[in-house]
Image (tube, rainbow, N blue to C red):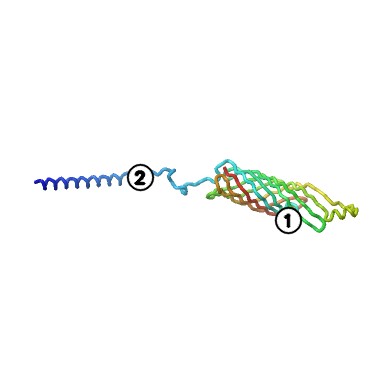
Amino acid sequence: MTRRLLLLTLMTWLVAGAASARASAAEAATTPPEPVPVAALPAAATVSDARGGPVALDTGLVIARPALLGTGMVRGVAAGVSGAGWLTWGLRAAWGQALEYTEHWAITDNEVRLRAVGLLQGNAGRGTWALRLGVGASAIYTTRDRAQAGRLGAAGSTEELHTTAWTLAPGGELEVGVTLRVVGTWGLALFVGPSLHHARGDTIVGWGGHVGLAWLP
């Protein structure tokens, strides 16, 4: 009698446990999954803006074809500011120096280039690509020194041995480049493209490039 009672009790527990497991499984199957919070998604599932602040600043080295001289290269520094957004504006300034030597003259051009720029830009990962059109003017200060001026002066020559002149030339550049965020708000900027100047009745087609640091708040 006792064995039958124990066996009946054991079978009752087994049946009750099976029924409870079936009920839990049915409830889990009919309950919809909870939505995953946006903050819990991996970073790759969201699109980040490489240009978080309203403006960006950059400064660096510039190399270009001279606006007036037929040979040599302009080497100097440049700086600029630009806004955010896919279509925006900016301002740029650059200074550089170019040297040219002929049989009779040593010519030095100091160029100051001022530009208002328009940019078409977009984000690509940690960087920003941009197409930049700059329009403005270049002020060129030219000095010409006669070769062997000391000897000619001692010989009593009346020829001009040193001359200076200012030239204002309208010009512009069309550049393509990238700005890559490296550490925090600091990044690297690289731009290159053709340039155009009109001076002394001639149109001079050249090229230019800029590489430097960028601040991207």
Q: Number of callouts in the render?
A: 2
Task: Identify whether 16 is placed above or below 148.
Answer: above
> What residue is shown with label 1?
72
Marks 1/2: CA distance?
Answer: 70 Å
> Residue, x 80% and y 48% (percent of image)?
165
Q: Residue furthest bottom?
A: 103
Query: Residue 39: horizontal and vertical position, in percent?
Result: 44, 43
Query: Residue 157: horizontal and vertical position, in percent?
Result: 89, 53
* Tag of residue 42: none
143 vs 214, left or right, is right
The amino acid at mark 1 is Gly
37 vs 50, left or right, is left
> What residue is shown with label 2?
33
The amino acid at mark 2 is Pro
> Residue, x 36% and y 43% (percent of image)?
34
CB-based contact (under 8 Å), mark 1 and mark 2: no
| SS for dot 1 | loop
| SS for dot 2 | loop
> Residue, x 85% and y 53% (percent of image)?
150
Query: Residue 187: horizontal and vertical position, in percent?
Result: 58, 48
Q: Residue furthest top?
A: 54
Front in this rendered view, residue 205 or 217: 217
> Residue, x 68% and y 48% (percent of image)?
77
Query: Residue 68: horizontal and vertical position, in percent?
Result: 75, 52
Front in this rendered view, residue 73 or 49: 73
